[in-house]
Image (spheres, helix red, strand yellow):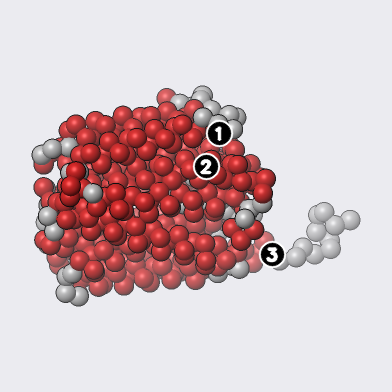
Amino acid sequence: MKWLGFVRTDWPSVRRLGGVLAASNLAEVLAEGAATAALLARVGAAALPLALALRASCEVVVSLGYDRMTRRRSPQRTLSLAQWLSALALLLCAAVFEGRWGAYAVFVTLSSFTRLRVIHFGVLSLSELGEAAPRALPAVYAAGRLGAILAGPLLALSTWIGLAPLFIVAAASQGLAVVLLRNARGSAAMSTRHAAAFAQLDDAPPSTFQGAATPAGGNMVTAILLATIALAVGRLALTTQSGAILEARFDEHRLAQVLGVYFAVANLGALLLQIGWVGRALGSGRLPLLNSGWAVVYLGAQTALAWLAPSAGLALAARGVEGELRNAVRTPVANLLYDVLPVAQQARSRTWVIGVALPLASLCAGALLTWLGSSPPTLAAFGITAGVALLAATLWQNRIWTDARRRVARPLRPSSPGFG
């Protein structure tokens, strides 16, 4: 247990929360793989820009509506209800999945329930773990990746059982998550600040550096906003380009098999990276290296899709950079960047960035790509421009964060208040 960073008394909560997350990830990866394979095979990659924009909009509407509906519930009951709703939605997906429009509707709407889990699992984790959260949450999220790894081989079964039954398996896994939630201790109401702190997190621990209020706080919000818009635009281009490559090479069931292998290998690699390096790098103050390092790799992926000969390996590698590598490396960094702001401003800043700017940028970029046509030159221009903008924004973020960290670490003079 020591090598994972938590102590023996944390083990019951780590085991329970890790099991809930693993069951949820198993369901979500199965559903995402099946929905992606069906959309590409039945509708085509050209539909991806608008579909992804509509997906982002659905996530925001569902998240805000669910927040209003469950505001007075405990974290445990809120997450349990979200898991039940997800299980019911998965069963409905199995029923309406046939045909082009069924696949399109499933792809657009299903991730909204994943977003609910992301938000409210983080709230419950903070409520249950309390002061142990900084040391125990990395182990919880590492355990959760095991579910995503297991989903890979199950996706490969689609050749024999079809894609629709995978949604039934996913619904059963969500039911298991609800059973594991019954003994969760998160019964107290969670503050808005803690809820917002996990609004964007998929597998990131809470912040370990609490910055003081600085004049540069507004600049950091602007830098984060620019990076978020660049990511939204770049994701549309990268996902559409890689999807077109996969669409041209595989039929529906073969693509589900390929995605199954991809999810298993990519999540295993992300798990090893998180355990072996990311935590230590952040602990030693190398946030700028992780932040801009991932941006360089991301720009490289966009450039490779634009200039190299298309291949399945290239498409999957690009998806891995934007997906699993981003979750393992950049998501913890993004959480820490907000610590430059005063605590009272963090929730509002996250709401504007994640709840407004991200879906709005996705919607506008998706509509523009749909109007212009998703030709390779257009997608390449969108992707490379977004990659350059992201790299510039991360360099700006690094400078602001480093300056703020230096101010906090600077020792106070003896004449300062607090030194008698």
Q: Point out the residue furthest to the right here.
A: 420
Within 10 Å of the Cα at label 1, are there few (<14), some (14-19), or many (20+) other Cα atoms? many
Q: Point out the residue furthest to the front here.
A: 160
Q: Residue at x 37, y 64 (%)?
A: 390
Within 10 Å of the Cα at label 2, are there few (<14), some (14-19), or many (20+) other Cα atoms? many
**Residue where numbered disc 2 is placed:** 17
Give the quarter of the image for residue 316: bottom left
> Residue 184: which disc?
1
Q: Amino acid at mark 3?
A: Ala
Give the quarter of the image for residue 95: top left
Vertical position of residue 50 compared to residue 227: above or below: above
Q: Residue at x 35, y 62 (%)?
A: 265
**Residue where numbered disc 3 is placed:** 409
Vertical position of residue 36 compared to residue 286: above or below: above
Residue at mark 1 to residue at mark 3: CA–CA distance: 38 Å
Q: Residue at x 30, y 46 (%)?
A: 30
Q: Amino acid at mark 2?
A: Leu
Proximity of marks 1 and 2: CB atoms separated by less than 8 Å: yes
Horizontal side, residue 224 vs residue 383: left or right = right
* Residue 147 or residue 243, whichever sits in front: 147
- Report helix, strand or loop for mark 3: helix
> Residue 221: which disc?
none
* Residue 2 or residue 240, whichever sits in front: 2
Q: Earlier in the sequence, mark 1 or mark 3?
A: 1
Vertical position of residue 210 compared to residue 175: above or below: below
* Residue 335 or residue 229, whichever sits in front: 335
Proximity of marks 1 and 3: CB atoms separated by less than 8 Å: no
